[in-house]
Amino acid sequence: MFVRLILILAILYIAYRIGKYIFQLSDEGIQKNRREITGEDLVKDPQCGTYVPKSSSIKATIGGEDHFFCSEDCRNKYREANKNKH
């Protein structure tokens, strides 16, 4: 009787682990699809050439043109380098 109880508990535990693994795989697939669907435009930093998501870039209007930078440091370097041009 005790052996049957242990055997049933072991089978239930294995079934639980398999179910958890299957749901984890399907959840990863859903997350991957969401990332592909909600892609974001990248902009190129004119100072260092790095591509950054537009929403996290630093926007500056220099010489009447909008530029997007990866950091304030790049923005400041670009402004300094182009100070005399505009």
Image: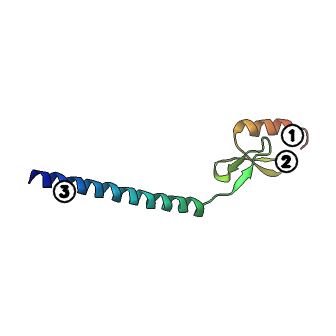
User: At label 3, which amino acid type do we have?
Assistant: Ile
Rendered view: 26 above or below 69 = below
Q: Distance between the residues labelled 3 and 2?
A: 75 Å
Judge depth for marks 1 and 2 and give the one in front: 1
10 or 55, which lies in front? 10
Q: Nearer the viewer, mark 3 or mark 2?
A: 3
Badge 3 marks a residue whose secondary structure is helix
Side of 22 where 46 appears, left or right: right
- Is the Cβ of the residue at disc 1 closer than 8 Å to that at disc 2? yes
> Label 3: which residue?
8
Q: Which mark is residue 63?
A: 2
Q: Which mark is residue 48?
A: none
Cα–Cα span, label 1 and label 3:
75 Å
Residue 16 image offset from top left, x and y in percent: 29, 56
Would you call the spot at circle 3 few (<14 residues within 10 Å), some (14-19), or many (20 or more)?
A: few
The kind of residue tagged 2 is Gly
Looking at the picture, how far across and down is residue 20, in whole percent? Answer: 35, 56
Looking at the picture, which amino acid does disc 1 mark? Asn
Give the quarter of the image for residue 4. bottom left
**Residue bearing mark 1:** 82
